[in-house]
Image (cartoon, rainbow, N blue to C red):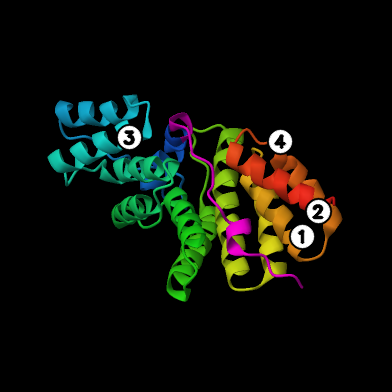
Amino acid sequence: MKHTPCSRLLGQRGKRPVGKILAGLLWAVIASGLNTSSGQTAEPQANSPAEFDAYLNILAKTTPEGVISATEMFERNWPHSELCGKVNEMEMEAFRSLNNATGAIRAGAKALAVNPDNPAVLASLAYILADSFSDSQHLAQAERDARKEIEISEKLHIPRWILPNEWDRNRSAIDSEAHAALGLIAYKQGNIRKAIQEFEMAIKMNPSPDPAQDYRLGVLYQAAGNKVKAIQELRLAANSKDTAIRMRAQRELKALQH
């Protein structure tokens, strides 16, 4: 079986727009205080108008740099706020959109210190760790986070105030990322077959096309000797609006077709 260099499979995942960062906060609201048996939430609250205004200021930012600056100011002024978990999650996604794994991991760890069962943070951290490291310690932590997210997701009950299709879409997207993390872990451990299974599951569950997942699955199919499926996935990735992913996919397709 041909070995696929990590640099070809992994690379950088495209930057996340701030709109997508803030869209993910719906799940943060759910996860911050959800009772898995009743579907009821104990929503974190600001304890003063000034604290709430500072939180709204974060939501108003339109760039990752602006989000990071506003979250850091919030933490300095209200280090014990009930909203810190949400603030840390926004900070994590802002760092991630800048491909700053160190900052994202640090912010994610703070978010989990507030709420260890936040599925969105668990899935994101698992993916970032699996994408950024190859040593056994970090991969083991990534696997624990990914599997914990999947376990928690299976137990969650839909809150009465969320439409079923919206709930399913958000949960599926986060579960997809957890499976993609498990795919990266399996690949780095040399288990190509398991990596393919996890990425196939990630793509199946994802409510929106993810060119990075298509690219990685295509390269895995190539490593497994399945040229037909490799070309199929790489063609999907080659249509990506993300320049880096599109160019990588086109390069792999050119090599396969010659």
- Identify the residue at horizontal 74%, vertical 47% (top origin): 234
Tag 1 residue: 222
Q: Is residue 247 magenta?
A: no
x then y, percent, for residue 249: 69, 46
In the image, residue 184 sits, relative to residue 114, either above or below, namely: below
Marks 2 & 4, CB-CB < 8 Å contact = no
Assess disc 3: are there few (<14), some (14-19) or many (≥20) residues with their C-alpha within 10 Å of its C-alpha. Answer: some
**Which comes sooner in the sequence, label 2 or label 4?**
4
Which of 48 and 70 lies nearest the eye of the viewer?
70
The residue tagged with tag 2: helix, strand or loop? helix
By secondary structure, the bulk of the magenta-drawn segment is best described as loop
Q: In the displayed structure, does residue 166 sit left or right of residue 68?
A: right
Tag 4 residue: 239
Q: In front: mark 2 or mark 4?
A: 2
Tag 3 residue: 65
Alpha carbon distance from label 4 to label 3: 29 Å
**Which comes sooner in the sequence, label 1 or label 3?**
3
Q: Is residue 15 magenta?
A: yes
**Which comes sooner in the sequence, label 1 or label 2?**
1
Assess disc 2: are there few (<14), some (14-19) or many (≥20) residues with their C-alpha within 10 Å of its C-alpha. Answer: some
Marks 1 & 2, CB-CB < 8 Å contact = yes
Marks 4 & 3, CB-CB < 8 Å contact = no
Please name the amino acid that badge 1 sits on. Gln
Alpha carbon distance from label 1 to label 3: 38 Å
User: Which region is colored magenta?
Assistant: 1-20
**Which comes sooner in the sequence, label 3 or label 2?**
3
Q: In front: mark 1 or mark 2?
A: 2
Please name the amino acid that badge 4 sits on. Asn
Which of 5 and 151 lies nearest the eye of the viewer?
5
Tag 2 residue: 256
Q: In front: mark 3 or mark 2?
A: 2
